[in-house]
Image (cartoon, rainbow, N blue to C red):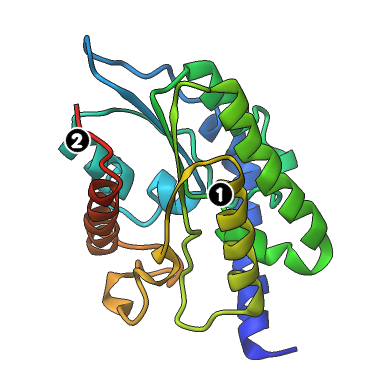
Amino acid sequence: MSSFLSRCLGVSAVILCVITSTACSAAQPVDVTREPGQPVVAFYGDSYTRGTGASDPSLRWSTRVSAERDWAEFNPSVDGVGFVNNRDVLSDDLVDLIVAQQPDTVIVTMGLNDNFSYVDRRSDIESAIAADLERFAEELPDARLVVVEPFWYTDERPRSVETIIGWVRDAAENVDADYISGASSWLEGHPEWMASDGIHPNDRGHAEIAERMNDALDDLDLPAR
């Protein structure tokens, strides 16, 4: 077994321990509070979007972006979850929670953790990506759907990373969603942007993601309030 694969499996084991102990509380967020006329934006993601690695939730990239754009943020993201990976551990499915909010925009950043299930569940992952995006498109027909290339956390990239990126990109195209490319490389070459665990972005890393995300959202003409 390669040293890189061994590290990936080690990361997966750590994440599974975390999600098993915290999933129930993490997957039951309170309803979002919005001001009159303020758009609700839902974030569908994993630990990178939940803000793991940031010193405070206000410093995670999704909250930085929401604050800058005056959005009401709904973020039920959970550590270790993917389109398939650890999905059965959750007491409430994240897609259900997001649909129930009837947001104005959904930003999908899922996919990193599915690399840890790729060998055994390749076909399931491809199907789940398509199914989730189709649900958002069908059940939230008035919402803008923005799909982001899945994040990645090391300069080394297993073959599965590009495969999953391709599935996500194709599924986004099939439902006419907006697509943001390049996110898997946003932290590449910058170990100083990573938290002490070597897996998640630190405050600086979240700030860098927020800056790049805002630029990409501007390119899509996604309005602030």
The amino acid type of the residue labelled 1 equals: Glu
In the image, 147 versus 155, the foreground residue is 147
Residue ID at (76%, 48%): 127
Outermost residue, top side: 36
Of 54 and 119, nearer the camera is 119
Closest to the camera, between mark 1 and mark 2, is 1
Q: Which residue is found at the position 26% from the left and 53% from the top?
A: 210
Q: How many marks?
A: 2
Disc 1 element: helix
Residue position marked by numbered label 1 in the rendering: 173
Q: Is residue 137 above or below residue 150?
A: above
Quadrant for residue 194, please give it: bottom left
Q: Residue furthest bottom?
A: 2
Residue 86 percent coordinates (x, y) = 69, 48
In this rendering, does residue 58 appear at all?
no
Q: Position of residue 171 (x, y in %)?
A: 62, 49
Q: Position of residue 64 (x, y in %)?
A: 23, 44
Name the spot of residue 26 as percent of width and height, x first.
Answer: 52, 34
Tell whether 216 sits left or right of 131: left
Residue topped by disc 2: 69
Q: Is 142 on the left-hand or right-hand side of 115?
A: left
